[in-house]
Image: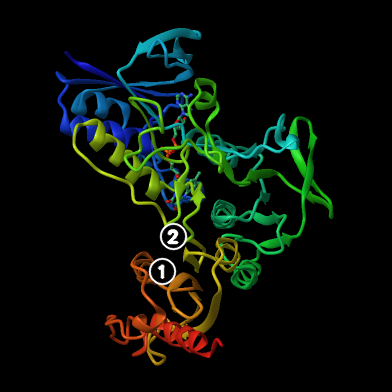
Amino acid sequence: MTQRMVVIGGDAAGMSAASQARQLRGPDELSIVAFERGRFTSYSACGIPYWISGLVDDPQELIVRDPETFRRDHHIDVRIRHEVTRIDLAAREVVATSFGDGGREVREPFDTLVYATGAAPAQPPWAGNAASGVFGVQTLDDGAALRDWLDQEPVPRRAVVVGGGYIGVEMAEALIRRGLAVTLVERSPQPMSTVDPDMGALVRSALVGLGIDVRTGVSVTGLHERDGRVCEVLTDAGAVPADVVVLGLGVRPNTGLAEQAGLPIGVTGGVRTDLQMRVVGVPDVWAAGDCVETFHRVSGQPVHIPLGTHANKQGRVAGINIGGSYATFPGVIGTAITKVCDLEVARTGLLEREAAKAGYAYVSATVESNNRAGYFPGAAPMTIKLIAEQHTGQLLGGQIVGTSEAAKRIDVLSVAVWNRMSVAEMTALDLGYAPPYSPVWDPVLVAARRANNAVAETP
Ligand SMILES: Cc1cc2nc3c(=O)[nH]c(=O)nc-3n(C[C@H](O)[C@H](O)[C@H](O)COP(=O)(O)OP(=O)(O)OC[C@H]3O[C@@H](n4cnc5c(N)ncnc54)[C@H](O)[C@@H]3O)c2cc1C
C-alpha cells in the first residue's frame, strides 16, 4: 500500500526531507504532499539581502526549485498558499487553510509527518501594528514587499535597521548599496553579539567607516508615523528619522502548531528530536531546520542555531531515514560567516562567554596578521582570536574579522574544533602557501602559536 508523507513548510528543511525520501522511494511506494503558506518553495532566504541591494537582479535566481518542478520532476504534491492550522496526531491528519480558495479548509491524512516550519522573527510590542514602511526579512515574500517599497516613489532616503546581528548588518550593507543613509540601532554594547565584544568592536569601527550611523546600547521603544507611513524610530536615546525600517531582531523556533499537538519542546524552545531527526517519543513524526533544538558538540549543551546549513542537512537526514535508509545529524559547533561591504566576520566553536558558561577554564589569544604576503598587492590585515582549554590546549573556538578572503579561513578552525585538535597540533598544520594567498606563516598558524604560548603560560 502507498504510504502517505506530509511535510509542513516548503523551504530548506522540509523540501530536503521530501526530495531525499523521494529519491529513495518512488511515487508508488510513497505519496508526498508539502504544504507551504507562502508563494515560494526551496528559496534562499540567505540571498534576500543581495536581492534587496541589487547584486542579484531576479528573485527567481534565489529559488532552487519551484513548486512546478517539484510536481513535474519529483512527483511531490506541493501546495503553496496553504497554511497548516492544526496537527491531529490521533486522527493522523493535518488541517490546512487554502488562501487561494477563499479560506477553504483542507484535511490531509498522513502515515509520516515532517514538521519543518522554520523560525518566527521576534516581534516586540511596538512592531505589532506597524505603519507601512516597516519590514521583516524572514521570507522571500517579506523581501519582495521591501523591494517594492524601495522601488516606489517617493524614493526612501533614510533607513533604520533595528538589530545588529548578522541579518541586521547584511541589510545595512544592502541599503547602503542602494544609496540610502543607514542607521543601525542595537541594544547590546557592540554589534554582532555572535562574536566576542572585542571582535564586535572591530566590526563596529568598520561599519562606522562605511558611513553607517551605529547606535549601540540603545533600545527601540516605538515607531512614529505620519499619514500611515513610518517617519521616526523612537529609542531610549531619542528619535531617529526613518523613511523605511528593517527589523532584524532575531528569531525563535516556530513551534506554535507543534505545541498545540503536544510535540516535545526543549529548553531552547525548539522541537526535540533524536539523532535521526525523529521527534522524541512521537512515532512517525520528524522535525528539522530552524524549528528544532540541536546540540553543541563542544559545550555538550542543547542549542538553537537557526542556519540554512543545518536546515538542509537535518532535512536530508530526516528524508533518508523516512526513505528507509539510515543517517544521523551529528550536532553543530556554531560556525557562521557573513560580510558587510568589504568587512568579513566569521566564528566557530565557543565564544569566551559560552566557554565559561559550559564550565571550561580557557585562555584566549588574538593576533593580527595579513591575508597575503606583505609585498603582494591587496595585502590586508585580519584579526584572529582563538579560545583554547587551559592545560589541554584543545581548541574551543575561533573568530575572524578582516577583509579579502579572511573569513573563509574559519573553515580550517572549524575542522580543528570539530576534530578536537589542540592548538599545539595546529601549529604544525600543512596549510597552503603562496604569496597571493597568505604570508609564509598563515594567520591561522600565527594564531595557533600565540594560543599555544598562552596555554603553556597557564599555571
Ligand atoms: C535574511 C536572511 C539571511 C540569511 N543568511 C543565512 C546565511 O548566510 N547562512 C545560513 O546558513 N543561514 C542563513 N539564514 C538562515 C536560513 O535562511 C534559515 O536557517 C533556513 O531558511 C531555515 O530553513 P527551514 O526550512 O528550517 O525554515 P524556513 O526557511 O523558515 O522555511 C519554513 C517554511 O515553512 C513555512 N511555514 C511555516 N509555518 C507554516 C504552516 N503552518 N503551514 C505552511 N507553511 C508554513 C514558511 O512559510 C517557510 O517557508 C538567513 C536567513 C535570513 C532571513
Q: Name the one closer to the observer, 421 or 405.
A: 421
Q: CA distance from mark 1 to mark 2?
A: 8 Å
Residue 354 quadrant: bottom right
**N-terminal label among 1 and 2:** 2
Q: Name the one closer to the observer, 76 or 435.
A: 76
Q: Amino acid at mark 1?
A: Ile
Q: Secondary structure beneath disc 2? A: loop
Q: Amino acid at mark 2?
A: Thr
Residue occupying image coordinates x 56% and y 57%: 173
Specify the quadrant that holds the N terminus: top left
Mark 1 crowdedness (10 Å alpha carbons): few <14, some 14-19, many ≥20 = many
From the viewer's perspective, is residue 217 above or below residue 267?
Answer: below
Residue occupying image coordinates x 29% and y 80%: 431
**CB under 8 Å between callouts 1 and 2?**
yes
Q: Which residue is mark 2?
A: 335
Queried on whether the Cβ of the residue with tag 2 lies below 8 angstroms from ligand 1, the answer reads no
Residue 327 image point, x, y percent: 25, 43
Q: Name the one closer to the observer, 192 or 302.
A: 302
From the viewer's perspective, is residue 435 above or below residue 240?
Answer: below
Residue 6 image point, x, y percent: 33, 21
Q: Which residue is mark 1?
A: 410
Q: For this view, does 207 lie left or right of residue 396?
A: right
Residue occupying image coordinates x 50% and y 8%: 102
Mark 2 crowdedness (10 Å alpha carbons): few <14, some 14-19, many ≥20 = many
From the viewer's perspective, is residue 138 above or below residue 66?
Answer: below
